[in-house]
C-alpha cells in the first residue's frame, strides 16, 4: 500500500494537469487520501505483527 501510495503521489505531481480541479484534487490527495492510505498501511502492519505474535504464542502453548 505504501509503495502504491508513493507511486501515485509521484505520478500525480508529475502530470501537466492544471487548474482549480487539479489543485483541489491535489489538496484532497495530500490531506485526505494519502493520510487514509498511511493509516490503512499502519493498521495492516499492526494486525500482521499481532497475528504473528498470536501464532507464536499458540505454537509455544502446544509444545
Image (cartoon, grey):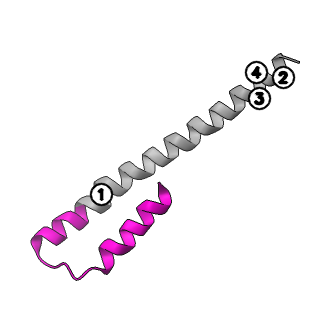
User: Which residue lies most toward the left here?
Assistant: 20
* Residue corresponding to mark 3: 56
Q: SS for tag 3?
A: helix
Q: CB of mark 1 within 8 Å of CB of mark 3?
A: no
In the drawing, does residue 2 fall left or right of residue 22? right
Tag 2–tag 4 contact (CB < 8 Å): yes
Q: Secondary structure at mark 2?
A: helix
**Marking on residue 44:** none
Q: Residues within 10 Å of mark 1 (few under 14, many from 20)?
A: few
Between label 2 and label 1, give the one nearer the viewer.
Answer: 2
* Residue drawn 44% across the image and 66% down it: 6
Magenta stretch: includes residue 15: yes
User: Farthest right residue?
Assistant: 63
Task: For marks 4 and 3, give the CA distance.
Answer: 5 Å
Q: Is residue 62 above or below residue 35?
A: above
Which mark, residue 60? 2
x%, y% of residue 51?
Answer: 64, 31
CB under 8 Å between discs 4 and 3: yes
Q: Earlier in the sequence, mark 1 or mark 3?
A: 1
Q: Is residue 23 above or below residue 56?
A: below
In contact (CB < 8 Å): disc 2 and disc 3: yes
- Residue annotated with mark 4: 58
In the figure, is residue 42 to the left or right of 54?
left
- The circle on residue 31 is 1
Residue 22 is inside the magenta segment = yes
Amino acid at each position: 500500500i505504501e509503495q502504491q501510495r508513493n507511486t501515485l503521489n509521484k505520478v500525480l505531481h508529475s502530470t501537466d494537469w492544471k487548474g482549480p480541479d487539479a489543485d483541489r484534487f491535489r489538496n484532497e490527495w495530500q490531506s485526505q487520501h494519502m493520510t487514509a492510505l498511511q493509516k490503512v498501511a499502519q493498521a495492516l502492519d499492526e494486525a500482521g505483527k499481532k497475528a504473528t505474535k498470536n501464532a507464536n504464542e499458540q505454537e509455544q502453548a502446544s509444545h
